[in-house]
Image: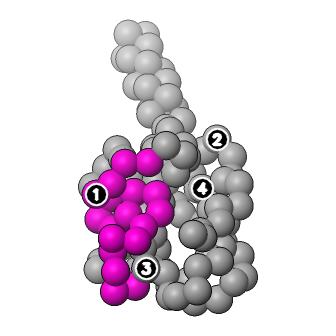
Amino acid sequence: MKVLRNMAAIAGLLTVAGAVSADSLRWTIRSDYPHIVSLEFYSQDYNRAWPGNGKVYILDDYNPQEYVLSCETGETICYGAWVRGNETQYWGVGLNNSQRCNDCCYTCGYGDTDLRILNR
């Protein structure tokens, strides 16, 4: 009987642990800037970025682009964008998550982002 109670407790813990799991966050971003913009997303909770591996997303037209990121529920993700070849002109947290921002982060699992428009 004790073994069954222990197994039930372990199963309960596994169910709870499974509740904090993979989720997704959809970003919609449009660049109105007249030059090519590089874009990357940075986790504030883990050491990772999207698209990652030294790559960036490219915004080279005026159409809204959607990015669906696989992430952990509750994970905070910020966008960083910069003019290609001139990272001093940036939006959000900029290149390599190196700047501060007031309104460029969202939490995974709590709904999709509003349209973000990059201009100046």
Q: Residues within 10 Å of mark 1 (few under 14, many from 20)?
A: few
The residue that mark 2 highlights is: 110
**Dot 4 or dot 2, earlier in sequence:** 4
Q: CA distance from mark 2 to mark 3?
A: 29 Å
Q: Which mark is residue 98?
A: 1
Give the residues drawn in magenta, as a range. Answer: 84-101
Residue type at mark 1?
Ser
Vertical order, 10 against 114 (above or below):
above
Q: Residues within 10 Å of mark 2 (few under 14, many from 20)?
A: few
Asked whether the viewer can see residue 90, the reply is yes
| Label 2: which secondary element | loop
Q: Position of residue 80 (x, y in %)?
A: 43, 64
Residue type at mark 4?
Leu
Q: Quadrant of residue 7?
A: top left
**Dot 3 or dot 4, earlier in sequence:** 4
The residue that mark 3 highlights is: 83
Vertical order, 51 against 105 (above or below):
below
Q: CA distance from mark 4 to mark 2?
A: 8 Å
Q: CA distance from mark 4 to mark 1?
A: 22 Å
